[in-house]
Image (cartoon, grey):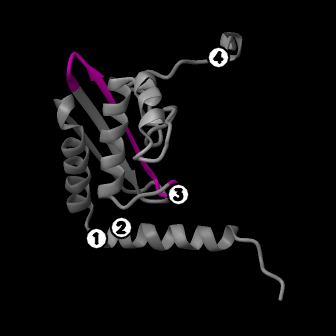
Amino acid sequence: MSMEEHVTKIMEWDEMLPAISQGAISFQCRSDDERVLKYMEALNHENTFQAVTCERAFLAALDGNCKTPIAGQAKVEDGKIRFRGLVSSPDGKQMFRIERDGDASDAVALGRGAGEEVRKEAGEKFFEEMQAYVQLIQAANEKPVRG
């Protein structure tokens, strides 16, 4: 994009965890559209696909969405995947972190397993309170309907 002059800092792997799949570009089409799937396959970057797959499996195991305080990042190098994840209470007072390493071909299982472990450690009450908070925020952000 030729915008290097606007960069003020490059955040390194160990400095922060972004939102799940942050910065990844994805494409979508009908599953039976062979012609478009052929073109899309040529655009696929396998390491990024595996990393995003791992991150999304983590998010799914936590029943998270774009409004829940969940972060995670995976990277693939030499066929190995490294994942770091974090779940926080909305006020930031409770945080649950996890790191996992494994074969990149096991991206889904690795992400899901990390999410299940965090879910078990935090307890269901933690996630019930988080979902209640998310619903409260959503209700506050909805425009009133005039009758």
Residue at image mark 2: 127
Q: Is residue 32 positioned above or below 15 on the image? A: below
Q: Position of residue 131 (x, y in %)?
A: 44, 69
Q: Residue flagged by tag 1: what amino acid is it?
A: Glu
Tell me the magenta residue range. Answer: 66-80
Q: Which mark is residue 7?
A: 4
Q: Position of residue 40 (x, y in %)?
A: 45, 30
Residue at image mark 3: 67
Q: Residue flagged by tag 4: what amino acid is it?
A: Val
Q: CA distance from mark 2 to mark 4?
A: 36 Å
Q: Secondary structure at mark 4?
A: loop
Observer-nearest of 28 and 110: 28
Q: Residue flagged by tag 2: what amino acid is it?
A: Phe
Say which residue appears at 48% left-offset and 59% top-offset: 90
Specify which label sits upstream in the sequence, 4 or 1. Answer: 4
Q: Secondary structure at mark 1?
A: helix
Specify which label sits upstream in the sequence, 4 or 3. Answer: 4
> In the image, is residue 77 part of the stretch drawn in magenta?
yes
